[in-house]
């Protein structure tokens, strides 16, 4: 399956656009990382200009920020409690930005993008 970020090949009327050229490598997309709660597993991807992107496929540790003490601490992730991106992600323990996770320190909201940043930063929720 090829994921691209081109416009649709169909016109609003339903007829097809005639392709002026083929797909380019820089238009290529990728499948979502679907970060799980398991031992750490990352995939390094080369971006445009030789930049590196770290896709976090699985992790069991989060950097949790406590607003009262204003400090970050590493905490073990127990499970995913809520995920506004997709309600079925809770059942599969998939973490995305905005997901609420259950940690050793309590419930926390994920503020980083695990599939893009390669780490999970979270803020404690009272």
Image (cartoon, rainbow, N blue to C red):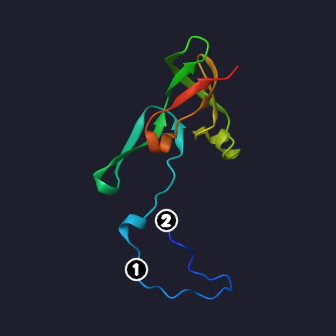
Asked whether, in this view, residue 58 is left or right of residue 47, the answer is right
- At x 46%, y 61%, the residue is 29
Asked whether, in this view, residue 24 is left or right of residue 115, the answer is left
> Dots 2 and 1: beta carbons under 8 Å?
no
Q: Is residue 20 above or below residue 23?
A: below
Q: Quadrant of the C terminus?
A: top right
- At x 55%, y 21%, the residue is 65
Residue 102's quadrant in the figure?
top right
Q: CA distance from mark 2 to mark 1?
A: 14 Å
Q: Secondary structure at mark 1?
A: loop
Nearer the observer, 111 or 80: 111
Name the residue beneath numbered marker 2: 3
Q: Secondary structure at mark 2?
A: loop
Asked whether, in this view, residue 115 is left or right of residue 90, the answer is left
Place of residue 125 in the rendered image (x, y in percent of width and height, measured from the top left)? 67, 23
Which of disc 1 and disc 2 is earlier in sequence? 2
Place of residue 49 in the rendered image (x, y in percent of width and height, measured from the top left)? 30, 55
Residue 90's quadrant in the figure?
top right
* Dot label at residue 113: none
Pointer 2: residues within 10 angstroms few (<14), some, or many (20+)? Answer: few
| Count of picture labels | 2
- At x 45%, y 34%, the residue is 119
Pointer 1: residues within 10 angstroms few (<14), some, or many (20+)? Answer: few
Nearer the observer, 38 or 110: 110
Residue that protrudes farthest toward the left in the picture: 50
- At x 45%, y 31%, the residue is 39
Name the residue beneath numbered marker 1: 22
Place of residue 48 in the rendered image (x, y in percent of width and height, measured from the top left)? 34, 57
């Amino acid at each position: 399956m090829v994921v691209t970020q081109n416009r649709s090949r169909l016109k609003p009327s339903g007829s097809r656009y005639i392709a002026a050229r083929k797909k380019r490598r820089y238009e290529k997309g990728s499948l979502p990382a679907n970060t799980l709660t398991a031992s750490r597993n990352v995939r390094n991807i080369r971006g445009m200009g030789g930049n590196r992107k770290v896709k976090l496929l699985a992790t069991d540790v989060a950097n949790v920020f406590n607003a009262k003490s204003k400090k970050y601490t590493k905490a073990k992730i127990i499970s995913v409690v809520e995920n506004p991106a997709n309600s079925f992600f809770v059942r599969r323990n998939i973490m995305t930005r905005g997901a609420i996770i259950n940690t050793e320190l309590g419930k926390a909201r994920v503020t980083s993008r695990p599939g893009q940043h390669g780490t999970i930063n979270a803020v404690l929720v009272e």
